[in-house]
Amino acid sequence: MTTGNEDNKMNKKLMLHSGKAVLEKLRVGGHEFGLSPRYGIAPGDWVGAVWVPDDAMGTRWFSGFRWGVAPDFWDDSHAAHRLYSARAETLSQRASWRESFKFRRAVVPIDGFWMWREIEGERRPFLIHEKAGAPLYVAALWHPAQNKGAGELAMVTVPSNRLVEPLGARMPAILRGDEVNVWLEPGIVSERPLQRVLNTLPARDLRVRATDAHATGADSLREADDARAAITAVYGAEFRPEKPKFSHKRRHVLRESEAGGHVFFRTRSFTRDDATVWHPVVDIEQGYVHCDCPDFRYRHAVHEPDVSTPQWWCKHLARAVANCQRHGELETVK
């Protein structure tokens, strides 16, 4: 994947082996895409998605889309680029997604997704799945392909929950219950009800397994021989995948100095490996945050460098700012 934003590569592969059982649960009226089990669906591949065509009289179809969108307004310099994911927080603001968010929504059924983490110089896969083995329904946006080719699709992502955070800052936006019906309802075009269903799935609803990095097909579901050691390297020795528990998150902020009308302080990140390290100086400027942490610098440099960055872009900073305001260390910006 050649675009810069950290979601594009996603560091993920999907799998679907439930086949017809999933389509029945989604009340799909017809399908035109294969239902053979697939265990390594990667960005750029074909992926099956449930959608409602304009001429289908409300009937849901399961069709194939190319995973990766090339917006119409891109010129030839972007020919090799694709957008593989879309941040839930900015769907109505980005030209790439504004129309699709209103009129071209889809659901990608999966049985789980992999994320990778480097351990002792080797990239290791970790399988994330529903705790009882039920299917997961990922919100997606589709786009008509250029030159009348096959449709293209991007997954919607949200901030990771505590189970996925050690593996990546973003995860798929997973819909539950009636949220699927809201997302697929063509008559809903308002932002508020659609944004309301794009939530981070609680960590308690998922399980993680360290799987064999060299296996393929159905064998890729089996646990690695050193699964316990891999889990310990990522989550700590006390972590138990079958009953995950997480320590209470403590937010730390250290007032640093004040100069030129700006307040500077240091904070800690809770989404990266350096969670115990005080980050460089943070500048609060007219309600916006500029952080020098690696995560923030990367996002701002390659995702939307031409716009001001609101506090929620760096979620550990948003809480730090609130703490400062609560203790009178920073005036509330009107």
Image: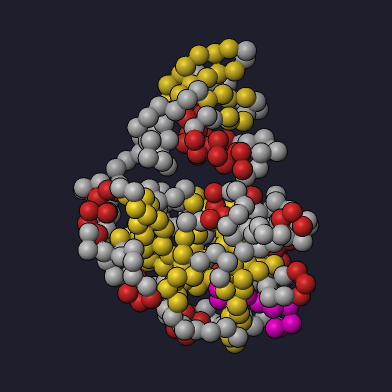
Q: 306 or 192, which lies in front?
A: 306
User: Residue 246: x, y in percent?
Assistant: 30, 47
Question: Looking at the picture, does residue 18 appear above or below residue 139?
Answer: below
Looking at the image, can residue 256 be seen? Answer: yes
**What's the residue at 50%, 39% (across, down)?**
295
Looking at the image, can residue 105 be seen? Answer: no
**What's the residue at 45%, 70% (across, down)?**
40
In the image, taking residue 289 as reference, residue 274 lies left or right, namely: left
Q: 114 or 81, which lies in front?
A: 81
Question: Looking at the picture, does residue 230 appear above or below residue 43?
Answer: above
In the image, taking residue 322 as reference, residue 216 lies left or right, namely: left
Question: Looking at the picture, does residue 295 appear above or below residue 142?
Answer: above
How are the residues colored? secondary structure
User: Residue 57: x, y in percent?
Assistant: 71, 83
User: Residue 224: x, y in percent?
Assistant: 26, 64
Q: How many marks?
A: 0
**What's the residue at 47%, 48% (across, down)?**
169
User: Residue 147: x, y in percent?
Assistant: 77, 72
User: Quarter of the image containing the C terminus?
Assistant: top right
**What's the residue at 49%, 51% (across, down)?**
170
Q: 194 or 81, which lies in front?
A: 81
User: Quarter of the image containing the N terminus?
Assistant: bottom right
Magenta span includes 55: yes
The magenta stretch is: 47-56
Task: Tell me where residue 116 sits by quadrant.
Answer: bottom left
Magenta span includes 85: no
